[in-house]
Image: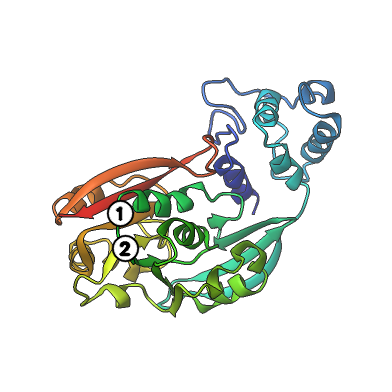
Amino acid sequence: MGGRCIASADRAGLPFLRGSGGVGARAGEASTDRAPSRDEFGVGVPTDLAGAIFSATADGGSDLHASATWGAIRDAHRRGFSGVWASKMIRWVELGVASVPGDGGVLRLMQRGSEFSIMAGAIELMNSRLSGSEQALASLTRERLKGRAKPQVLIGGLGMGFTLRTALAEFGADANITIAELVPAVVAWAKGPLAHIHGDSLTDPRVTIFEGDVAELIKGQKARYDAILLDVDNGPEGLMRKANDDLYDAYGLAEAHAALRPGGVLGVWSVDPHPVFTRLLKTSGYDVEELRVHANGRGGGSRHVIWLATKR
């Protein structure tokens, strides 16, 4: 769990790197071989926060390392991330476990204070603190479809509902939105422990929930959708389920192309760039934009990738 929490902090925008140069060194900064003193640790950071972090790291009881430079912590505080550090003092609690159909492993719903995470093993698939790129998947797609009446939208992957809620806000009162979620427990979590995050999105009359593979709603369809938004398995290089690769290969892209109306948009979210996938989109009948979007939506932290592929 400790290593994953470091990754979570990095995704929230904290300037930490892990490597042979020394755990906790900032990019472009030499690492330190010693733990900072309590006074050094607290420079520019509220006393209670600095003391709590110092005590946890010095005692070896936290996933934050005592060798982390206090400059990084000070910078994080200046950028408004003190809440992230404070949350490190709270343990993760497992709320639920679910199997992914098709031998896709196990998902776990975790909670730490007001923060929620859905994880696959040690990999965090989504976090309630990080919604910027998922929201951008819907809003950027809508920008390219302005003026379309009664848009038909298919979203692959419910997650924590960030894309769905943005689509409801952006596509208007006459939209019809289908959300496909492969793992029934994810829908159950949305109606249970994550209900306060999802709000009334799942009961909105414009929304249809399909518990199954989004590929089933794409295959064989002809000019049915104005937009297909895929936030499935961390992108084209999936982690969870081999069958998800079929969405992103030449055959899957051809099926999506046929299912889109003229000028419709295939939007794809990914945690990382994928040059081969970009080239494949361009040779599959799409005009392609590849965008880098901040994960936290505030202009800081790591960036994710969104492809907007418009049907020619």
Give the secondary structure at mark 2: loop
Residue 31 relative to residue 236: left or right: right
**Residue 13 seen anywhere in this rendered image of the structure:** yes
Looking at the picture, does residue 37 appear above or below residue 13? above
Query: Mark 1 and 2 residues: CB-CB less than 8 Å, in contact?
Result: no
Picture coordinates of residue 111 (x, y %)? 69, 60
Q: Nearer the viewer, residue 272 or 305?
A: 305
Instruction: Please name the residue that numbered disc 1 is placed on.
Output: 145
- Going by the numbered disc 2, the residue's amino acid type is Ala
Looking at the picture, does residue 302 appear above or below residue 311? above
Count numbered badges in the picture.
2
Front label number (1 vs 2)? 2
Give the secondary structure at mark 1: loop
Residue 24 relative to residue 211: left or right: right
User: Where the N terminus falls, by quadrant?
Assistant: bottom right
Coloured how?
Answer: rainbow
Picture coordinates of residue 299 (x, y %)? 52, 35
Looking at the picture, does residue 219 appear above or below residue 121? below
- Going by the numbered disc 1, the residue's amino acid type is Leu
Picture coordinates of residue 220 (x, y %)? 20, 77
Q: Nearer the viewer, residue 6 or 49?
A: 49
Picture coordinates of residue 290 (x, y %)? 30, 43
Circle 1 Cα neighbour tier, 10 Å, few/some/many (<14 / 14–19 / ≥20) = some
Instruction: Please name the residue that numbered disc 2 is placed on.
Output: 149
Q: Nearer the viewer, residue 225 or 293?
A: 225
